[in-house]
Image (cartoon, grey):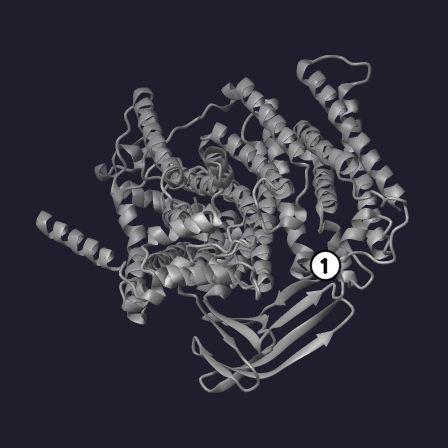
Amino acid sequence: MYKRVLQLVLIVFVAFTMLGASSPSARFGRLGHDLMCTCGCSQILLECNHVGCPNSTGEIADLHAQLDAGGTDAQVFKFFTVKYGPIALAEPVRGGFDTVAWIGPFAFLLLGIILILLLLRLWKARHARLAPAVEPATPDADALRDRIRNETEYGE
Amino acid sequence: MPFFGSVSLLLALALSVYTLFAGTLSLWAIANGRALAVAPERIRETARRAGIASFIAVTAAAFALVWSFFTNDFSVDYVLHHSSIALPGFYKFSSIWAGQEGSLLLWAWLLAAYGFVLRLRHKSDITLHAYASTILAGVQIFFLLLVTVVASPFAIVPGGVGPADGFGLNPLLQYAEMVIHPPMLYLGYVGFAVPFAFALGALMMRYPGEKWIAITRRWTMVAWLFLTCGIILGMHWAYAVLGWGGYWGWDPVENASLMPWLTGTAFLHSVMMQEKRGMMKGWNVWLIFTTFILTILGTLLTRSGLVSSVHAFAESDIGNWFVGFLVLVLAVCLFTYLYNRDHLKNENHLESLVSRESSFLFNNLVLLAACFTVLWGTLFPVLSEFVQGSKVTMGAPFYNRVAVPIGIFLLFLTGVGPLLAWRSTSLRAIRRNFVLPCIAIIVTTLVLIIAGVRPWSADTQAAGDVGSSIYALVCIALGVGVITAIAAEFLRGANVVHTQTGKNLFESTILLTRRNTRRYGGYLIHFGVVIMFIGLAGSAFNQSKEAEMSFGDSMNVGGYKVVCQSYSEDSNANYDSQFALLDVYHNGKLITRLAPERRVYFVNTDHAQPSTVVAIHSSLENDLYVVFEGTNPDNQKPIIKFFINPLVNWIWVGVVIVIFGTFIALVPPLKPATRRVEVPAPIVPDAALGGSLARGPLPLSAPENPHV
């Protein structure tokens, strides 16, 4: 059973790894959506809809040139960061302090979950100490409880 | 009129100051049993009346501004900068909140209006209302100070004589929804000041019991509803006006409206734990404090230019005032909480991880995590500049990666929470309640995969949308599961009513809802939210194409064939426009004619401004969204951009359901269930029922609050 689960995980992992492979036009589309138009319109590069925008045409040409030159994603991002500044990237992907941007929300969520679990443990311990022992609810008790609830309140 | 307006504002300020000081003095004397030269109760009453009078004074000031706009009084600087003779009357009215000074006046007026209603309805609890009224007066003073000292809407142009015509209204704001979007949003923002005032007041006076929650419940729901409508109207405005094909750009100002909505939603859920079981008292107080503080923070972000935003038309230098007010509010909240925290002791504690209380806790956590994510994403560029010396962009890709999984977790809890019982849920109940939703999820997933939603397919990989596709699949399947759970709850209740009354299932459902409006209204709200989530998931399958189209040219996009019939230009007093007439065919049949338009306002001036009027053909399946982007300068051919946006209409339909559900939840129940059903211990000899029944009444059978 354990081996089968491991095999499944490996297959899923390989499948997802292979998902990264894409055609040049798809790569252009993907990277173009990870870059910003720097004219101040706050729009994704490939979504900038200003005819005659002073920046997006040049940026798109730069993106084509970088892809034709065979640069990796990281090299393309580095080129844009150097030429247009970090605001040309639609998300912080330069490593270093940028990583904090990604960690923050998940750290908050994780901390919250740990806190709730700790709180629950504390409350349960306190409840067990203070309250007299209560026998656990049985299926029949639940059924009766549901029936009473339905027949009286139509709700909680 | 400007003079009348200024004097009215000063009068309103003086009355609010009196309300604050007289209210504080009388409440202090009453609380401490001190005698004053005049009976404290009489002083308290004068404070209430001064508060009511302040509403009349602010209304007079608002009227003065409306009058100035409609009479084209360009000697008023604000009117000069936001109106013109050619501006239609419809937009002259909405110009009132088109800029800084007018928006602040609108805020002050709405706050005064809320205060007016609160002070009129004071008889349900005179002392608590007096506390809330006094606190509201404190907030009101801040906004009146802004519009009298810092940003007066009645400032006169240098020299006192205005030019013959004004500069006009920002074209982006010349759209029907802009007439109601800002007031709705402000009604939501300002509305949260009322539950905040009640919560702070209840804590200050160490209000016994949970009655203050019952008093403020409707206020909170109304504020929440207005904020919801305001946010959605803003989304629709962005969709129909900005012309980039989307409805939510994660702009800091959009984020600013979302944050209090998230904490307000958390409060509306969490407060039920306090009502039902006397839990989470301190938490609830801080949730409503935070919600109010976030409304101020949102205004600070909008006004100060702290973060760059497309809402640049509202920026100014009054940020320091808001920072000061924010610090003051935080200090008052913190002091009051620390001074009275022993009053907020919980009466019960969480007993099981698998319980309604626990689901509310996780719901709160997820909503707060979402709020934190939005705040984090909004402020991180500032933090980055401070640490690294350069600003970074936190665009849609960041939020899609971080906020979407959190949103899906929230959707999951929306389905799970209502199916769990208070205190603890048995395994049997879980099995019974979750079987149908789980089947629905599995079936939907299979149907979607068969229909072509395959994240692993070559097409999806080529588009680079694997992540979005997976999220969409999960979101839609989960959404159908939640809808099934809600439907099963309705059906279960309706069957009981049907058994009791003999009415048919439809009538039974109506009766069931009317008997417990809060619960079933809540379910309808959840249903609406799920429909919205499904609509949002549709964005994973958006497509776009751009083409130069002259007469007779055609284009195939997303199952539609679009044929260009003509291209024309027009001119009127307010703007010049270029537009294309496009015939849209579906399955070989002409279904509509679209006219995407590009306007140029303030033609022949040095501040000519282009604007887009998008043409949309909507269906439940998708939107054909067409933008006239301009003309190619080389060959003068119109450039048209087409978007196929699936399921967008589901978002707007979902909102209508949310509004309907909220109205139902606000209506008092037809027949409150107040009976306590007790099961006498001796008549249950069956040992299988266990000790919990033998000991007497069941905990679930005692509704403390008839409205739950």
| Element under disc 1 | loop
Report the front residue among B358 and B493.
B358
Identified at 57% across, 46% down, the residue is: B308
Identified at 28% across, 25% down, the residue is: A133
Task: Locate residue B507, reporting x and y percent.
Answer: 49, 62
Whether residue B703 is situated above or below residue B70 in the rendered picture: above
Task: Locate residue B674, reporting x and y percent.
Answer: 50, 40
- Among the 4 quarters of the image, the one containing residue A35: bottom left
Q: Which residue is mark 1?
A: B607
User: Is B201 on the left-hand or right-hand side of B92?
Assistant: left
Whether residue B574 is situated above or below residue B355 in the rendered picture: below
Task: Locate residue B221, reporting x and y percent.
Answer: 57, 45
- Among the 4 quarters of the image, the one containing residue A113: top left
Whether residue B304 is situated above or below residue B557 in the rendered picture: above
Identified at 68% across, 41% down, the residue is: B316
Report the front residue among B291 and B626.
B626
Disc 1 residue type? His
User: Is B478 on the left-hand or right-hand side of B395?
Assistant: left
Q: Is residue B696 visible?
A: no
